[in-house]
Structures are given as structure tokens and as C-alpha cells.
Image (cartoon, coloured by chain):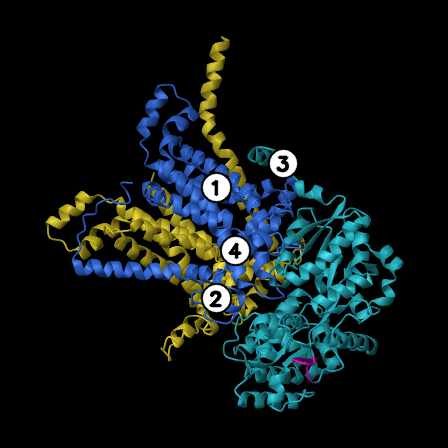
Chain colours: A yellow, B blue, C cyan
Amino acid sequence: MAHLANADFKTRLQSWLPKLVLSPSLALVLVFVYGFIIFSVYLSFTDSRLLPSYGWVGWENYSKLWRLSHWETSLINMGIFAFLYIGICTVLGLGLAIFLDQKIRGEGVIRTIYLYPMALSFIVTGTAWKWFLDPGIGLENVMQTWGWESFEFDWIKNRDFAIYTVVLAAVWQTSGFVMAMFLAGLRGIDNEMLKAAQMDGASNWNLYRRIIIPQLRPAFLSAFVILSHLAIKTFDLVIALTGGGPGRATELPATFMYSYTFTRNQMGIGAASATIMLMTIAAIMIPYLYAELREKK
Amino acid sequence: MSVATQDTAIRTGRVMRTLIYLVLLLFVLFYMLPLYVMLVNSVKPLEEITGGGMMNLPQVFTLEPWFKAWSSAQIGVEPTGLSPYFWNSIKMVVPAVIISTVLGALNGYVLTKWRFRGDTILFGLMLFACFIPFQIVLIPMARVLGELGLAGSTWGLSLVHIVYGIGFTTLYFRNYYAVFPTELIRAAQIDGAGFFQIFWRILLPSSGPIAVVSIIWQFTNIWNDFLFGASFAGANNQPMTVALNNLVQASHGVKEYNVHFAGAILAALPTLLVYIVAGRYFVRGLMAGSVKG
Amino acid sequence: MRSYLKTTAIALALTTAAGSAQADAHGGVEVLHWWTSGGEAAALNVLKEDLEGQGIGWTDMPVAGGGGEQAMTVLRARVTAGNAPTAVQGLGFDIIDWAKQGSLADLNAVAAAEGWDDVIPAALQQFAKVDGKWVSAPVNVHSTNWVWANKAVLEANGIAEPTSWEEFTAALEKLKAAGVTPIAHGGQAWQDATVFDGVAMSVLGPDGYKAAFIDLDEEVLGGGAMKEAFDRMAVIRDNVDENFSGRDWNLATAMVINGEAGFQMMGDWAKGEFLNAGKVPGQDFLCFRFPGTAEQVTFNADQFMMFDQGGSVSDEQAALATAILSPSFQSAFNVVKGSVPARTDVSDAAFDDCGKKGMADLAAAASSGNLFGSMAHGHANPASVKNAIYDVVTAHFNGEYDSETAVAELVDAVSIAK
């Protein structure tokens, strides 16, 4: 009798165990992510300045936010940055992966070199880039001392072009990682199918265009998730490279939010900008996640 | 290492191959450039740097900046160099990486092999959590850590990194286990193996590649984090990035760029090492799992 | 909910090695600051040794970056967690904000015993004494309306120390004609604003400066004199090199030291760079007030706020505050830092010519009512307003606005930030 009850308990435990194992993670995410998001949205309707405070002010923070011209600048920059960064990283990553997939000598070394920038923090690589881009001591200067007198490269000092230097450094950091994802995808493709197509006389170009690249769809999607997550969180890079300048020309929503919340003591406006950012992310990511996850059922 | 040298069916001509090598080498230069700038300038005396010519090789070679960055540079009131902070980082990173990877593995296991109603939504919730901007969680997180009595402790900092890493580790393991044959699990179940037994005996032994991906990803992100480290560490457990920041950002006085660069490379050594040692398994891990839907 | 969280966290942490940092503060002081460069840290070490001589331990919590911005973020996390450091380096309105939150300890007993009310200038007391309560201990007084000049470059071009805007622009013309960069400048918002401090003071005069930046009077902020100030900023913009954007201030100072540039407008911390390069004040380089502001001093002061550790001010905090305001520390620290002592009764014997001049200027300005908080360094208005002014000044300096637009934007930006 006792034995039976014990067995019954065991089966029930077995059926509950998976959910039990999942629950700590879920609890952590619910509290530390969704709880905090709700808190932050709530703060955006309050008069919080130095620290959270709970006086309700309605939409005031939002109306102030939209009157700030460099909030607009930061949104436009985000658009430019995300489009170019995700686009260039994807194209470059795919291109390099295809090239590296041609039985290249020293592939291991080359791959490591392409990947290593991910390992470095921008606190100081930012300085190295800043020097390199500085017309006075960097590339422009070097080219000119090497005899190319008319060479000009002063984007970082030009408020219309500075955002592109941020793109450049960001691409440097992550395109190797994207390359690795595509390389992995390429290695997973069935060779038999390619050989069959080759028999039929398909050119390399057509092989890639018609057969290989369409099969990389999952890799494209993973790359998109990783890259958009990094694009949204781009913060250290801007601080180290341009400090948001010249003027406020390279301000991004993440730097905007940080500066309003923590250095300008206008936590309410900072929270309002965070809310808008989160809603934008949700608007892009939820349809994507929905499509991705539903398909696999 | 069958993966790294796997045959491809694509054949290319001689001219094309030369071109490919050229392009690949060009990008080797592009990726190496900042590291070159940092390395070259970390072994020059300061006068040589301020004299200009950041691309030039050193005229006088010195390792002094490296020793200084490691053991005698001014970080706070005392000239301790980066060395004490190195261990603080290790103590924080190792548990955070291990725990978040284990949790990710378990979650991935449950979400693919023990499916239940609504599991996809739960996974979606975890995945969306990856996108939360860290700046907005600082204040509420500080409050919670204070309530838990973990403020200023290494464990508190590890907890923060675990929480915001779970989304990624779960994603990696879920995608990896998704393609793992479910029949094996069912067979083991019929043989009477329990939840943990199946995980331990069947899934774990073949989880190497994806564990590498998860560990590399978590290690890199946590090691390089500055914002959480600065905000949630106490005086005795500030991580390496905070110390590096103190070294580099000192607002007054002579900026010792050579020491800064040496310090930066020192601070990055563990992550570089992880990439070099585990890099070959990295692509294999990505191949085996995370890029397949 | 809370207990559930607790168990989760503890299960995760696997052990309860928690709260170690809280324990450290007992029997000592934990000091959050951003003075990590060699000279500053060495000066702070004097304080540390002083306390250790009294048997008080010093737990160091340095967080550099952004002139203290990073440290202020950390402070907010620490206070929210209920784990405030004992003493925190603070500036201007930040101190007032924290005092109004009720986070700071009452130092009145120490202040009375040490007679702070008599030796610290009233303009500075505004930022150390909130609602009749001393809450922080001032370390120094910096002033921002300085011009630094390379003497040899000026002499080679027949330029005397300019005392008016007209003389100054004439000097700039000469330098430009001689192929020297007239003004060394780093294009970062706070540096643009530092220059603006001096320019605005010279155009608006002390009353106008006070009305605009301290009282935030919209008529003055949007007035004709303000437009004139922006016009002068444009003149300065025309006299910096084209590579100025994003440059650190000390690299700009190096340009003056090396003779590549004639002038730099920067606070007195720039002096340390000259001294480090082995230059002698009056002989190799000159220090003088921005033309047209000879009488005035725009200041900012580093202080240590004492955080309430539960009720009354602790013995350790009292000892730290006393040590900070002791004349010997005030002298030793400020000789290194380039600033002048926060108390007016410290001997100037140990200071160089520029330091002596700074001390004399401060005393004179304090007694004639010409001592004003620096807008650029958070001593004229709260952080939100300060940064709103930064936005406009830096946008104008980088050519985004003309002077007329800048004036209109200034009024608007300040009203949003108020």
C-alpha cells in the first residue's frame, strides 16, 4: 500500500517536474524583465526626477519628449544606424562566409581573426577607433604622410557623417560573428543536392542564388535577432567613439534615455523614451517571433 | 574537426580563388587594424605616442606599460593596477556563466522534449526578454538587490547577469535540442528513465557544441559588461571593466595611452583566450543548433 | 512575493555569501569618488592616511567617467539599494538634490565646532548647507573663467594680455595671420559650455548672468545681449582648428603648451598640465581672466556629501569632514589640483603665481558680490537645465543653429527642462 502511494507520487512528480524546472527561470524573467518594464512604463507617467517618485502627471513627459529636437535626431540616427548596420553585417557576413567556405588554407586562423572583435570591450577599442578616424593623427594623416596629399577622411568630425563612423566600428565588431553563423549554415547544407544541380550545368552563381542562400533562411533570421538586439543596445560604442557628438549628431535612443534618466535628473522623460523604445521593439519583434514560433508546431 | 574542413561541392577557378584570397586577406587587415593600433602603442614610451605617428612601429620597445597596467597603475586611491580586479571578475563571471548555461540547458530540454500547453508563449516571453534595454532596469534592480540583501555583493552581480542571460541560453539550447531525435527520449522513458536521468544520460553527453556557444556568448557579454558592474558591485568586488574604466577615464593629468592600451588588452585576454581555444567548436556549435530553426 | 523572490535568489546563489559590502562600512568610511588620475589620487591618499592615523579605515570606491556622471549613476543604484556609501564626491546642485531627498547627514555639530560658517564663502555655502543644515564638506573651489596662453607665442606676435573683447579679437586675428591656431578647444558639450560661461559673463555682466542662468529669467535668456553672446561664440568657433570636435580638454591644453595654439579657455585644472610639462607660470605661460570678466569669478566646487547612515552623523564621518576642511589638507590638495582652498583663511605660501592670483580673486569676488556658480559645471542651475543649455550651446557651436535660432531654442529648452 505504502509502496503504491509512493509510486503514484513519483509519477505525479515526473509529470510536474518539467514545469517545476522551468519555473525559476520563468519567475526571474517575469519579475526582472516584465515587472521592471511595467514599473518603467508607470514611471513615465510620474514626476520622477532624481529618484522614482509617484506623483501622477499624465502624458506630460511624452509631450515634453516630442518637443525635444534631439529626441528626433536620436530616432533618425537609430533608423540610419540599424538599417546600415544590420544590412552591412548581413551582406558582409554572408559574403565572407561564402568565401571562407571554399576550402581556404588557414581557415581556422582567418576565422579567429574575424571573430575576435566580439571579445573586446568598447571602453578601449573605442579609443583605438577614435584615433584611427581622427583626421589629425589617423588614416587621413597617415595617407597624407605617405604621399597621397589630397586624401580626406574626416567623417567623425562632420556632423552629417559622424553616424557612419559609428556604423563602421559596429560592423567591425560584429560582422565576424554573423560570418560564423552563416558559415555554420553553409556547412549544414546537403552536398548531394548541389552536386546534382552541378550535373545539370548550373553555374556557381546560380547554385548560390537558387539553392544555397534560400536554405540559409534560419541563419538569416537568427542573425537578424542578434543584430537588432545589438543595434538597440548600442551605447558604449557611441560614448567611447563620439560621446554623442559632434554636437548631438550621433545621439541614439539608448544614450538619450541614459542621459535623461541619470545625468539630467529627468527620470520621467527618460522612462517615456524607454517606453517608446520598448514599444518599437515589440512592434518589430512580436510579429517575427510569432511567425517563427508558430511555424514549428 | 570534420566540420572545419568539410567538403563543399562548389568548384572555383584559379583566378577566382586568387581573388577570394585577396578579399579575405583584405578583411584580415580590416579586423586586425584596431588591435594593431593598440598593440603597437602599448609597447612604446609615452613620448613616442604623443609625438604622433600612431601607425608606426615603436622606435624604443618597452614592456613597462604592461607591467604598470597590471600591477602599479592608479585605479583609485592606491596604485594597485588591474590585477586585484581580475579575480573579482573571475569570481563573478564563472558562477554566472555556469548557472545561466545550466538553466538554459534545462529550459531548452523542457521546452522541446516535455512540451505542454502554452510552452511556446513562455519561450516567446523569455526570448523577448533579450531585448530589454539595460539602462531601464538599473533602479528597480538596485531596489530588489537591496531587499534581498545582495546589494554590493558578488552574488548579487552574478544574479543580475544570470537573469538577463537566460533568454539567450534558452534560445541556443532550445534550437539545438529541437533537432535532437525525440524517439531516443521516448525509448528511454519506456525503459523507466526519469526526467533528470534522460537529461543526464542522453542529452547532456551530446550538448558539447551548443554549450560552447552558450558559454562563449555569456562569458563575453558578462566579462565585458560595465554598466551592471559599476552599479551593483561593492567597493571590494568591482570587476575588471570598472577598473579599466577608472584607468582610462581619469579626467585630469597626463593620459598614459600606452598603459591604457596595455590595460585594455590585459582586460580582454580571458575573452580572447576563450575565442582562440574554443573558437573552432564555436562554428560547429552554431552549425549544430542555433542557426537551424 | 518578496519571500518568494528571496528563496529564488538564494536557491540561485546556492550560498548566502551576501551583503559583504555593507559590512565593510563599519568602523571605517567608504568613499565613492572619481579622482583616479595620479595627482588627484595621491592627494586623496593624504586624506586616507590622515584617517588611518586616527584608526579609521578607508574603503575606496572609485568610479571614473564623464566628470562624475558615472559615479552619480552608481550612487543612485547604491541609495536605491539602501546601501549608500559613507561619503560621496558631489558637485553643486546634485548636493542640493540629495539633501532634499533627505539622504544626507546633518553635519551642524562638526561645522559649529570647526567654525565653518566664518571661513567658507557664502556663495559656496549655498551648496554645502541646505535649509540651515550642513550636509557636505567642500574640498576646493575651481574657477572656470580663465584663459591660458603660451607666453612665447604671444610675444612673438606682439600680443599683450588682452583685457577686452576687442583686444582679444585683435589678438586672434594676429595669431591667425601668423599661421598659429588662435584658440585650442575640444568640441565636447561641457567644454563648449565652459567657454560660454566666460563669454556670457563678459556680455551680460554679473547681473545679467545671474538673471539668465541662476534665476532663469526668460527675458534675459531670450534677449539681445544673449544673442550677442552667441555671436561671440561664433567668432570663437571661427578661431579654433578644424579638428576640434571630440578632443579631450587636456589635448587642447597640450596644443597651447607646444605653441601650436595661442589661447585656451578652461578651468584652473588646466594648470596641472602646464606644470606637468615643466612650464612655469608667468614665465612660460600666462593665466588671466576671460577678457571683460576681471572682477568676476565663476566657480565650481568639489565636495564630499555625507550620507545618512541611520540617524546621526557617525564619528567616522565627522572625522572625515574635519580632515577635509583642515587647512593643511586644503593647502596640500589644492596645490596639486590647481584649484584654491574652500576656506579663505588658508595661507597661499605653498601656491604658485596662478594659484595665488586665484586665491586673491576668489577672496575679492566673494567680498564684492561677484562670485557666481558656474553654469557649465552645475553650480548655477539643476542638471536638467544645465544640460538643456549645453544642447543649445553645443548645437550653435557646431553650426546647427545661427545666433537668433539659438536664443529662441535656449528659452524653449530651459522651459522644458525646468
In the rendered image, residue C306 lying in the magenta stretch gets the answer: no
Say which of C192 and C411 sits in front. C192
Pointer 4 and pointer 2 on the same chain: no
Which residue type does callout 3 highlight?
Answer: Ala
Kindly check if marks 3 and 2 are in contact, taking CB atoms under 8 A apart as contact: no
The residue drawn where x is 42% and y is 22% is: B194
The residue drawn where x is 62% and y is 68% is: C387
Which residue type does callout 1 highlight?
Answer: Ile
- Residue B66, which numbered label? 4
Kindly check if marks 2 and 1 are in contact, taking CB atoms under 8 A apart as contact: no
Between the C-alphas of marks 4 and 1, the distance is 36 Å
Toward the top, the furthest residue is A1
Between the C-alphas of marks 2 and 1, the distance is 34 Å
Which residue type does callout 2 highlight?
Answer: Lys
Q: Could you classify mark 4 by the number of other residues whose Cα lies within 10 Å: few (under 14), some (14-19), or many (20 or more)?
A: many
The residue wearing badge 2 is A130
Secondary element under disc 3, as helix, strand or loop, is loop
Say which of A90 and C31 sits in front. C31
**Which residues are drawn in magenta?**
C282-291
Q: Is residue C182 above or below residue A161?
A: below
- Residue C17, which numbered label? 3
Pointer 3 and pointer 2 on the same chain: no
Horizontal and vertical percent position of residue B119: 42, 36
Horizontal and vertical percent position of residue A158: 46, 74
Secondary element under disc 2, as helix, strand or loop, is helix
Mark 4 vs mark 1: which is more N-terminal?
A: 4
